[in-house]
Structure formats: C-alpha cells, structure tokens
Image (cartoon, rainbow, N blue to C red):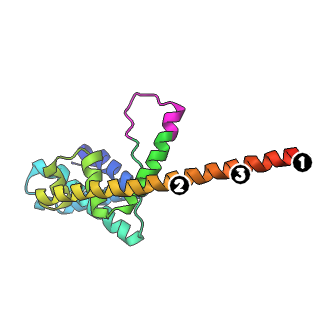
Amino acid sequence: MYAAYHAEIYAYLCRMLRDDELAADLAQETFVKAYRAFDTLADQNRARAWLYQIAGRTALDELRRRKIVRFVPWTGESRGTASSAEDLVLRARLSAELERALMRIPPRQRQALLLAELNDMTGLELADALGVSHVAARALLTRGRESLRQALAVERARSSLEEESRAKESARARVRADRREDEQ
C-alpha cells in the first residue's frame, strides 16, 4: 500500500501544508497509523480513500496544533506547455488570490475542495476520505465551492483596489518628478 499511494499522499499533504518536510513527516505518520489500524479497513477497494481520510485528519490535527492553515497555490498548469512571461505573472497573481481565498474558507470545505478538485476523487471516494456520507460530502463540496467563489471575489476586489492605489501613487510620483525637472 505504501508503494502504491505514498507519492499521492505526500503531494496532497504538501499542498495542504506548504511545508515539504512536515508533509514528509505526516505522510510517514499517516502510513504508521494505517498500518496500526489496517485490520479496521473493511474493503480493500477503498484503501485510497481510507488513506486520504487518515492523512487529512492528521494534517488538520497538526494545523490545529500550529494554528496555521496554508495551501500551495494551484496554477492549473498542464505539463509540456511553455508559458509566456505575461501568462506567468497573471498566474502568479491568480494563485496568490486563490491562496488567500482558500485561507478564508473553513478547513473542512478546503479539505473537500482539495480532495475533489486536485486529487480527482469521485463522490464516494471523497465521502470515504472525509469520513462522512456521500450526501454530506457533496454538501461540503458545494458549500466549499460557493465559499471559495465569495472569498475569491473579495480577494479580486482587494487586488484591484491595491493595483489602483499603486497606479495613483506612481502617477503622483511622475508628477513630482516632472515638477522637479521644471524647477531646474
């Protein structure tokens, strides 16, 4: 089971924690917990979701202990495509907005979104990984998407205001520089 799922669990924890070393430690802890509780796994076909459930709970416990919640921004990049400089700047900006928006939504909703969107879990796998019913998992995911939409709108508005403020300050600086040139 370790060989089949370690890389996937580690990547999930890296996204949740933004700390590779901590993710490696918690991935190891996840598999130790899974080994100890292996006899409770009723259906071998649900091992992946079961491991995600253990990893998610382990990560949330650690985040609660540390009082930090950070996520690696997802850029949506596909492999094998070269990005222009403009595209890279836009993606970095969107990633920063997305990361801040993700930090605004409740942890369980974040967890559901990450599992469903980044790890391509089906509804049943998501329910198993979250330790809830299929209906509850779908509700968490729906609420998470709506919360993310609202938080992202707030972040985009904030970014626009900051950009507008920087533009105004830049214009003022140019006017001051022009005045100094005229005075000389």
| Residue position for label 3 | 172
Q: Where in the figure is residue 3, as x and y percent of width and height?
A: 26, 44
Say which residue appears at 36% left-offset and 56% top-offset.
Answer: 16
Say which residue appears at 52% left-offset and 34% top-offset.
Answer: 86
Residue 49 is covered by the magenta coloring: no
Q: Is residue 78 above or below residue 14?
A: above
The answer to which image quadrant residue 18 occupies is: bottom left
Q: Residue furthest right?
A: 184
Q: Which residues are magenta?
A: 76-89
Q: Where in the figure is residue 171, as x and y percent of width and height?
A: 69, 48
122 sits left or right of 78 in the view:
left
Q: Please tell me whether mark 2 sits on a helix, a strand or a loop.
A: helix
| Residue position for label 1 | 183
37 sits left or right of 66 in the view:
left
Disc 3 residue type?
Answer: Arg
Say which residue appears at 67% left-offset and 53% top-offset.
Answer: 169
Q: Earlier in the sequence, mark 3 or mark 2?
A: 2
Disc 1 residue type?
Answer: Glu
| Residue position for label 2 | 161
Q: Where in the figure is residue 26, as x and y percent of width and height?
A: 34, 59
